[in-house]
Image (cartoon, rainbow, N blue to C red):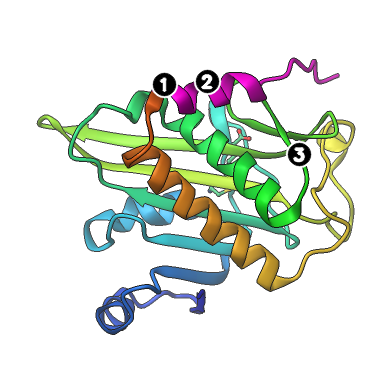
Amino acid sequence: MVVDFYPPINLVAYKKFLLYNIDMSIIKVEKISSTNDFIKENYAVLLEGDVVIAKSQSCGRGTHGRSFFSPKGGLYFSILLKPDKADNVGYVTQIVAVAVTDAIREIFHIKTDVKYVNDIIYKGKKAGGILCESDYLDGIYRYVVVGIGLNLSMPKGGYPEEIKSIATALMESCTTEQADSLCIKIRDLILKYYYEADIKSVLAQYQERLIEIDYK
Ligand code: BTN
């Protein structure tokens, strides 16, 4: 179950709420600058597996310092991991890509591919991306933040000129329930693949999903 909180998020109320609702560690806000930044700023009071979803982001970030267009109609969320060991941190983007493509197939019944290293591709166009950020201090990871942005349905005003030719959406329309189910499924698969699965077989799955695309 996903619970709607409206900004500013009251983390004290949220933690109290969690104490009584162990399974409800997903919070949703209308709008935020960046869900990755929110988790990075609050990682100390959040728990492993906690998720923040935003219906839109004002400063969504992509890799290489790029911005990530995040209007309503998409799914933008970040998950906090606090791994004890560094074992799989180097592969986290690949693990997440497999979890995202598996979850999309299970919930939406469509096949998506991956453009190395972090783009989610649908019918040859970019339908989403992954941004993982971590902080390592004194031999431990303080946090690994997994940020995922997916274009679920076409935004009202269409895509901006600079990404128009390469962007697409996964669905014509998408209900809130479908979006929430997808988010929960992705979170559960990430935790499973990160902590329980044989990393070699997850990486083999990743290789199988890779396709080559030249964005023009
Ligand atoms: C990329 O395509 O380069 C990666 C895009 C990652 C976007 C997601 S949306 C949720 C999270 N918050 C951010 O600011 N970025 C990630």
208 is within the stretch colored magenta: yes
Q: Is mark 2 on a helix, strand or loop?
A: helix
- Would you say 25 lies left or right of 176 here? left
| Residue type, label 3 | Lys
Confirm whether residue 55 shows in the render. Answer: no
Q: Do the residues labelled 1 and 2 touch (CB within 8 Å)?
A: yes
| Residue 111: mark in rendering | 3
- Would you say 77 lies left or right of 135 here? right
Relative to 147, say whether 86 is above or below.
above
Whichever of labels 3 and 1 marks the residue nearer the N terminus, that label is: 3
Residue beneath label 1, please?
A: 200
Residue 153 at what x, y percent from top left?
Answer: 81, 56
Measure how far apart labels 3 and 2 are at the Cα level: 17 Å
| Residue type, label 2 | Ala
| Residue 204: mark in rendering | 2
Residue numbers of the magenta segment = 200-216
Neighbours of disc 1 within 10 Å: few (<14), some (14-19), many (20+)? few
Relative to 92, say whether 215 is above or below.
above
- Would you say 85 lies left or right of 112 here? left
Q: What element carries label 1?
A: helix
Of the pair 77 and 104, the residue shown nearer to us: 104
